[in-house]
Image: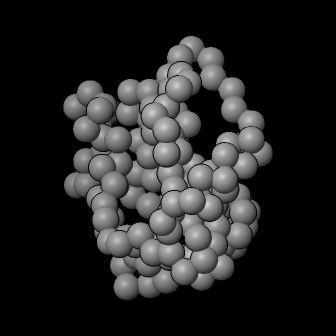
Amino acid sequence: MSPVQRALSGAVLSFSLHDEMRIVRDELASERDRIARTLLKDGALRVTLVALKPGAHLGAHRADGPILVQVLEGSVEFHVAGSSVPLPEGSLLSLEAGLEHSVSSAAGGIFLLTVVAQAALPPDLRQHPDE
């Protein structure tokens, strides 16, 4: 995968998700089981397009902030808190910050991952679990 050759932050950014999905599909063909393409990285906000080949699995991990997943193509399955959440195309899933999860895709899929990284926020704007 080549280094990013475009703006990741700015006052106004616009993307064609169809074009970005074509790029990750092309890159996935020559990669291992998955590919991720950062679309936006501005302060605490991160938006990444993630593609998984059929049978791919992302091991258990945690996000520093809350996440939102939107399945754009195919299907994925999130494994969180002892449950499996199947997400077909068109589904949305949100997880709170720090919740351990893993992801798999039996048939392959592409999803848009949005994360608000708590460590990048000023202390007065961070989520506090006891609130």
From this view, report whether residue 98 is shown above or below residue 121: below
Location of residue 110 by image quarter = bottom right
Residue occupying image coordinates x 41% and y 41%: 116
| Residue 60: % across, % down | 32, 71
Residue 92 seen by the camera: no
| Residue 18: % across, % down | 77, 45
Residue 53 seen by the camera: yes
- From this viewpoint, which residue is outermost toward the front? 30
From this view, report whether residue 85 is shown above or below residue 7: below
| Residue 55: % across, % down | 54, 80
Residue occupying image coordinates x 63% and y 72%: 108
Closer to the camera, 77 or 16?
A: 16
Judged left or right of residue 54, residue 80 is: left
How is the model colour-coded?
one colour
Closer to the camera, 70 or 125?
A: 70
Closer to the camera, 121 or 129?
A: 121
From this view, report whether residue 93 is shown above or below residue 7: below
Q: How many marks?
A: 0
Judged left or right of residue 65, residue 68 is: right
Judged left or right of residue 68, residue 80 is: left
Residue occupying image coordinates x 74% and y 36%: 16
Residue occupying image coordinates x 49% and y 38%: 2
From this view, report whether residue 15 is shown above or below residue 50: above
Closer to the camera, 129 or 66?
A: 66
| Residue 24: % across, % down | 62, 51
Location of residue 19 by image quarter = top right
